[in-house]
Image: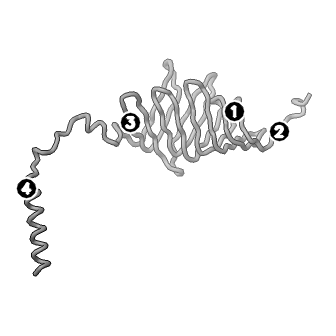
Amino acid sequence: MKVFAGVTFLLAATVVGLSGCTVADRAPVSIADLTDAEGPDQESWDVEYYVGEGGAARAVLRADHMARYESADSVYYVMDGTADTPVSAEVFGQDDAKSDVQAEHITFFEKARVYDLVGSVYVVTSTGRELRTEHLVWSEASGRIRAEGYVQIDSETEALRGYGLDADEMLDSFTLRQVTGRKYIEDDELE
């Protein structure tokens, strides 16, 4: 009987305590509350996103999913893929130069014009030079790409491995730290 009486008292105390709560006691939800929520402002699927500069196409990105986030001082886009179906991009340079890019995730920061590529990053330039890394940052404004981690660069004449890539966006000129690999030199280049 003591257990039953204790449960009855607890139930009665809960009912009395909750009877003072009403819907009017809750604060109203404002538009600011909704826009400050954690989710994206917009979402799209099977996306083809064009980035231009001076009326010319600068990059075309394709992704299974894209989310747009906006805050008071920035807008950024997160494009998601997988290792099997990565986000892909075509980056256009000067004089018909082009690079094809793939990564599992690409985040584009609109104001800074910076792309952050993560996961199985693969780049191939119009000259056939290939780059592989896990994380790459491309600053469209400066025309530079950087990768602090391990990088592989391959072409018909080179097979290089190293860390700390700093390069122009078409990989025509670059530096690496702790470099290993091979560079094939033609006989006429030695003279």
Please state which of the two labelled residues, at mark 1 or mark 2, is closer to the viewer.
Answer: 2
- Residue drawn at the location 47% of the way across and 32% of the way down: 109
Residue position for label 3: 69
Name the one closer to the observer, 99 or 30: 30
Q: Which sits earlier in the primary sequence, circle 3 or circle 1? A: 3
Picture residue at 17% right of the left edge, 41% below the top = 27
- Calculate the distance from the C-alpha at mark 3 to the C-alpha at mark 2: 46 Å
Q: Quadrant of residue 110?
A: top left
Residue under the point 59% across and 45% down: 134
The image quarter in which residue 35 lies: top left
Query: Disc 1 versus disc 2: distance between alpha carbons?
Result: 16 Å
Residues packed near mark 3 inside 10 Å, few (<14), some (14 to 19) or many (20 plus): some
The residue carrying mark 1 is 127
| Distance in Å between CA atoms under marks 3 and 1 | 36 Å
Q: Quadrant of residue 136?
A: top right
Residue 184: assigned label: 2
Task: Choose mark 3 or mark 1, whichever is in front.
Answer: 3
Callout 1: 10 Å neighbours few (<14), some, many (20+)? Answer: some
Amino acid at dot 3: Tyr
Residue 23: give x, y in percent of width and height: 11, 47
Left or right? Give the position of 153 relative to 8. right
SS label for mark 3? strand
Disc 4/disc 2 C-alpha distance (Å): 83 Å
Q: Which quarter of the image is occupied by the N terminus?
A: bottom left
Amino acid type at circle 4 is Ser
Q: Nearer the viewer, mark 1 or mark 4?
A: 4
Q: Amino acid at mark 2?
A: Tyr
